Amino acid sequence: MTADRATGPGIWQAYRLRLKRRRLLWRAFRSRHQLKSMQNRTGAIAPGDILLVMVVRNEALRLPYFLDYYRRLGVAQFLVVDNDSTDDTAPLLAAQPDVSLWSTKASYRAARFGLDWASWLLMRYGHGHWCLLLDADELLIYPHCDSRDLKALTGWLDRRRQPALGALMLDLYPQGPVGEGAAAPGADPLETLNWFDPGPYRALRQRPMQNLWVQGGVRERVFFPRRPRRSPTLNKLPLIRWNRRWAFVNSCHSILPPQLNLAYSGPGGIEPSGVLLHTKFLPDVTARAAEDQARQQHFNDPQSFSGYYDAIAEQPVLWSDKSLRYEGWRQLAGLGLMSSGGW
């Protein structure tokens, strides 16, 4: 379902949004003091390089495949903040020739769920570059991604004068109970997670920022059937030609200036878009959910989501008779979950 376009903010609202953007930029600038450089290879960044920025904690299972996946797509440099990992995440990243690594023990939630740190890296190194802002459990696919790399995609977006690519976050899950079995570090997560909900998804354009709000899918169906408005936001702007004056507001679900949010109108939209394959439900999900519940760093009101964590701990079966097996980007384009926009 495609969202209707909202009218732009009025003069007073536009002024308030400019002030908000400046406050967010100032927060990001101040947050640099919380970051300790562990391995700085940013001197190798060349004009035209595509950069990937991320904040991680205990992602040694996913990172080997994740890094190789995005290298194959054309990412030149990875700028990563490690938030006090207790596994092999930090040494794994420090050993990579194309990774610059920072560490922090500061509160993830107090840093706007890591967004202040990521925003500082975008501000400092991303200006003028096409940048990806991702989590370690997100794999971006887009039309022709099997034959055209990110350089080809961003070149085409530049010619269209389109500064961002929007995407639907699509949860992948196994056919059996979540949390069963094991996945080896470096393995393709799609070998374990290969089912998804084709819908329903609903999209709403919000004022005054004109940001999209997409909800639905498997997590709403299973975990929030009685409270659908509490279900996760599924739209993102994960790929953007960055400008140091811009500011993400809520992860990369929304951004200022507000007109940038119009780059994506959700499932069924006609503009170019992609899909973020969300690999959250690998076998480690139950252990991670227990840790997240104990740390209380992932929601503004963690106590209100205790039922969600408890449900994951029970290892539910997410598969239903309406689930589809994932087959590739053409399948998702045919379902209206992404669009080539004429590319």
Image: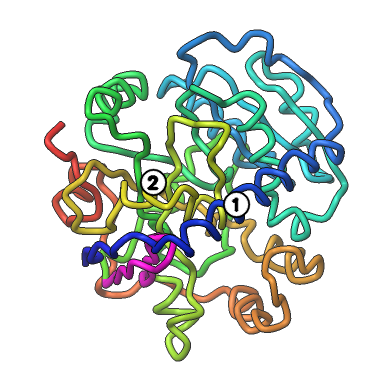
Sequence-earlier tag: 2 or 1: 1
Going by the numbered disc 2, the residue's amino acid type is Leu
User: Quick check: 69 above or below 118?
Assistant: above
Q: Residue at x 30, y 24 (%)?
A: 158
Marks 2 and 1 sit apart, C-alpha to C-alpha, by 40 Å
The reply, left or right, for residue 141 in relation to residue 314 is left
Q: Would you say residue 129 sits in the magenta stretch? A: no
Q: Which residues are magenta?
A: 200-217
Q: Nearer the viewer, residue 52 or 183?
A: 52
Rendered image quadrant of residue 269: bottom left
Going by the numbered disc 1, the residue's amino acid type is Ala
The reply, left or right, for residue 301 in relation to residue 341 is right
Rendered image quadrant of residue 48: top left
User: Quick check: 285 above or below 18?
Assistant: below
Residue wearing tag 1: 182
Residue wearing tag 2: 260
Q: Tell me, for residue 249, which label it has, or none.
A: none
